[in-house]
Amino acid sequence: MSIDNSAGHAGRTARAGILGAATLHEAAGRIGSLPSGIQAMSPTLPVAGRAFPVAVPPGDNLWLHHAIVAAAPGDVLVVSTGGAREFGYFGEVMAVAAVARGLGGLVIDGGVRDAQQMITLGFPVFADRRCIRGTIKDPRKAGSLGVPITIGDVQIEPGDLVVGDADGVVVIPDAQADDVVALGEKREAAEAEYFARLRAGETTLGIYHLPTPAQVLATQAATLTKID
């Protein structure tokens, strides 16, 4: 199953990539963040694209080989290992194949190997760990391509917006992505104003209208009084 990558979606993806994972997570109402253990192999290789979900059996990467062929150019392979993380599911050979087919990157809640070679290739990889432990390719084991998966507490569906950078990875449902990107751009504009005010001498306490230490103590005392 491939995913439509229309010009409109491509424009949205480019805008989302500029915003970054943390801004989109906040703009979405603090949803969609994948487990923090999933990190970039290289912080200089961010990823932004439409999700192509993949589920693999423990210690088996056959379905990942199929995914490289089934996904469309620009798609990001988002892979669930079902919790069997201590394997190197993806490496240099598969990365070369993915680059040749124009895929956007890989996000996996398991291990990868040949990390330096994949960085040299310029292929964005976000993984739970580096692991040299090899995998098998057993056709008797069930997996899936292009159907919803869950990583952590986040459900990933085909076509969802995936953005990863040095901070982590966020997945935004496709139906919400346009609005979230627009809100993210407004958030960035507001922060640009904050930066100017901070450089002019204001403080974060004033900008965010944060309580003073005395106000914090008074609030805590009032709370304790109510409990008593």
Image (spheres, grey):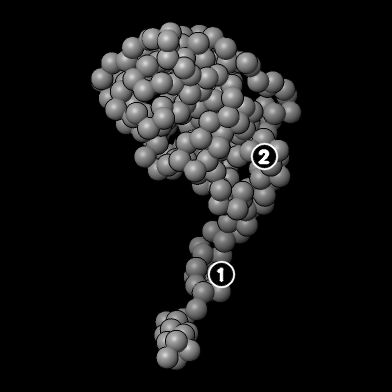
- Quadrant of residue 39 in the image? top left
Residue 90 percent across, percent down from the top left? 38, 18
Tell me the residue at 48%/32% (across/down): 46
Question: Taking the image as drawn, is residue 85 in sight?
Answer: yes
- At label 2, the amino acid type is Ala
Residue pushed farthest front? 140
Residue 207 relative to residue 224: left or right: right
Q: Secondary structure at mark 1?
A: helix
Q: Quadrant of the N terminus?
A: top right
Question: Taking the image as drawn, is residue 14 in sight?
Answer: no
Crowding at label 1, few (<14), some or many (≥20) Cα neighbours within 10 Å? Answer: few
Residue 153 percent across, percent down from the top left? 49, 43
Residue nearer the viewer, 97 or 150: 150
Residue nearer the viewer, 127 or 11: 127
Residue 47 percent across, percent down from the top left? 51, 30
- At label 1, the amino acid type is Ile
Do the CB atoms of the residues marked 2 and 1 lie less than 8 Å apart? Answer: no
State the residue position of label 1: 207
What label does residue 177 carry, if any?
Answer: 2
Q: How many marks?
A: 2
Q: Quadrant of the C terminus?
A: bottom left
Residue 134 relative to residue 219: left or right: left
Residue pushed farthest left? 132
What label does residue 190 carry, if any?
Answer: none
Q: Secondary structure at mark 2?
A: helix
Tell me the residue at 50%/68% (across/down): 204
Tell me the residue at 56%/74% (across/down): 209
Crowding at label 2, few (<14), some or many (≥20) Cα neighbours within 10 Å? Answer: many
Marks 2 and 1, the one that precedes in the sequence: 2
Residue 12 relative to residue 49: left or right: right
